[in-house]
Image (spheres, coloured by chain):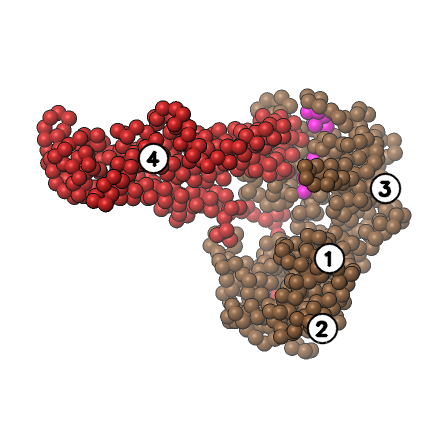
Amino acid sequence: MNTLVREIELPPTEETRSARPAALVRAVRNWSVRIGGVSLALLALLSICAPWIASADPTLLDPANRDLLPGARGTVMLSDGTTVSHVFRMGTDSFGRDLFSRVLHGGRLSLVVGITVAALSICAGLVLGLFGGYLRRVDMVLMRVMDGLMAIPSILLAVSLVALWSASLGSVIAALSIPEVPRVVRLVRSLVLSIREEPYVEAAISVGTTTGPLLLRHVLPNTLAPLIVQATYVCASAILGESILGFLGLGIPPEIPTWGNLMAEGRLQFNLYPHAVFFPGLFLTITVLAVNLLGDGLRDTLDPRFSRRGL
Amino acid sequence: MSGPAATLSIEDLTVQLPIGADREHAVQNVSFQIRPGELLCLVGESGSGKSIIAQTVMGLLPRQVRPVGGRVHLDGEDLLAASPRRLRQLRGVRMGMIFQEPMTALNPLMTCGAQVKEMLAQHTNLSAKERRERVLQMLERVRLPDAKTLQSAYPHQISGGQRQRVMIAMALALAPALLIADEPTTALDVTTQARILRLLRELQRASQTAVLFITHDLGVVAEIADRIAVLHRGELVESAPARELLARPQSAYTRMLLDSVPSLVPRKSPVDERAAIQVRTRQLTKIFDEKGWFRRRRRIAAAIEVGLELRRGETLGIVGESGSGKSTVARMIAHLLEASGGSVEVDGAEVTHLKGPRARAFRRKVQIVFQDPYRSLNPRRTVGSAIVEGPRNFGAGKEAAWQRACELMELVRLPPGALHRYPDEFSGGQRQRICIARALAVGPEVLIADEAVSALDVSVQAQILRLLDEIQERLQLTILFITHDLRVAAQICNRIAVMHRGQIVEEGSAASIFREPKHEYTRTLLAAAPGREISFKAQAPPGP
């Protein structure tokens, strides 16, 4: 006998549209993105507002206030010659400069270096990777050059590049960008190699789209999500790289406060006054952690292929 | 109810989906039973919740999806209340499983024999020697040729059908009371599928195993089911003994489903012999040379001296199993792949080695629709820009192209408003309509459909086939239809060419291929078509 459980109406011609939230919404819902993004925004805000939050001049030498501990009180002279009383929240270094002010100002440079290096290396890598992945002939030569670059440890490459040029913000950025390019090229190339096999690319070819527009309209937009993720990792490693160069005394000139420079200076008296290394180090850690968290969250939401946590 | 106690009994099962899914419950108030020795086919289209039921029974539901009501009993034991540890014991010992893709279900780093052996080692106290013997015995039971050598082969070294046999050997190694088979033959070629189905049926009869067989293919259902349960959007629509349900479906949905299955009786006669030949291939050959610096060169002949003629306004089907070279031929004709030898002529002009602007100009004439509706539209561009792209490439003005896109949307029965949306808002069938519109946008004379309906549910498939028929009539299109599905070919093709290992083994009118197949391979192919005893009446509406 037929057990007719329930009669239901014939389906509409085809099922309804999917209810998948847009990538941006999903990203904002992700806790890694939230925590990383907010911390990073706060750090950026602190750095941008450094001149107003940290009223003391970060480069002002003041022998009277040498090696003060965090929270110590003292007087500082303002640029117009008047003296005011001041709380040194993070203490001072061995030249009597206000550490709080130096750390915040240092943040500006670190973030600028991180973001610029990420932008530069992604742009260069994207262009090279697109051509390498799509044009077989370029690929052979290009990838061998990239292999050569990758064979040199990136920090050594950066050190030798900075040593070759004079130390300045520009040369540090260039020296940190160049070693990152091969990694980006490899990523873009592998993405392009898989995208070019997608049926929608073939479909575009078959409706007469030429190579230029094809790369621009169909290939490039589909590489962006993993690239944004890669950019955050590049950014984090550039911030670290700049600190390492600064610490080695090879980076941005020592009179400009950067986290690496601060730690390099503090190192001499680390046993006696650890705070001079601790605070820039703490900010560096938080920044890199925030950027990495943001990157992880973005990877999980924008590029689920590389994520293992999803459904 | 009479007879022996049910092996698997599901009562009022309701499974909840996470918030934000397309419906609240994946499965709602579903009840059915499977007795020892009975094979129940759970049938439904994609998204009907059939796999969810299998996963519930096995205790393998994703974490966000959970059963909220009902009971699932295996030989009287409550599975919903069982601990994860107990479920792990039950899987393998009391429940065997076979999945769709044996390549991913088998461990690529272990030999086939070792995997069956591991199964025995985990759940039995057999000695090493006994285990070895049992493994060999099991592999012989699933009729693997030369079981001795095969047990030391890795999964990638054997064919898909053989892998599925190893899976079956593993699933039945411990003589489970229940076998769950989730689309076990969907990834296989039709001749392999027929052999696997026969094997499954024999083993199951011999061991009196209860089988929960999940499939979307009504042909397969007709072939093997004792009982059928039809699922639609998570609800059980109908369940009855197979013969009864196939002969007298009670619900409208089942009727619609059965009516959508294309019949194996060819419907169209060849077009007029006097019609001009639009596409002709002569000795078209493609050889893939695998080059490597350190490897031995490998040559694969994907297409060998293929000669085809397509007359204006006709539909020629190329039928064959995977790897037979049918897509290679299609792509060479569409100029997406360069031929290694031979020639393609369109409207009498040779187009085989066109380059540059002349190749582009040729593209207007021949367009192609691909198999996978989910990958053939760029996810980052709107439907409108996808359709407009072709005409714009060929110099159409923005407004004219957009106007044309609106007309095409109407032609493929989609609202013109959809032009502003992104592909992921559409279902598979809707996407395939969009792909057809995109192909038609440049005004082709020849349309190549490369497995264009293979990824679609059977009811949607019927709609797309009907649409293709309509469009062909309206636009006087010539269609080259590539498919592995004989039923589909029977419904849409005037003539059929059967391909096997890169060569065309037989060619003729659809009627003659189906009624008097001459070549041995064609006969094998026809004999393997699942459910050929049941006459599915369904046809696209009669042609002109």
The quarter of the image holding the C terminus of chain B is: top right
Q: Report the front residue among B525 and B433.
A: B525
Tell me: residue B37, above or below residue B484: below
> Tag on residue B460?
none
Residue at image mark 3: B507
Q: Identify which residue is drawn at 47% across, 44% down.
A: A299
Q: Identify which residue is drawn at 57% across, 70% down.
A: B89
Where residue A140 appears, as percent x and y from the top left, is 61, 30
Q: CA gap, disc 1 to disc 4?
A: 62 Å
Check residue B363 for magenta coloring.
Answer: yes
User: Of tags 3 and 2, which is closer to the observer?
Assistant: 2
Q: How packed is label 1: few (under 14 Cα within 10 Å), some, or many (20 or more)?
A: many
Specify start and end residues of the magenta stretch as a single range: B359-371
* Chain rendered red: A
Disc 1 secondary structure class: helix
Residue at image mark 2: B208
Residue at image mark 1: B162
Q: Amino acid at mark 3?
A: Glu
Disc 4 secondary structure class: loop
The quarter of the image holding the N terminus of chain B is: bottom right
Res. A104 in view:
no
Q: Identify which residue is drawn at 62% across, 73% down.
A: B124
Examine the image and state in which quarter residue B290 appears: top right
Upstream in sequence: badge 1 or badge 3:
1
Circles 1 and 4 on the same chain: no
Q: How packed is label 2: few (under 14 Cα within 10 Å), some, or many (20 or more)?
A: some
User: Of tags 1 and 4, which is closer to the observer?
Assistant: 4
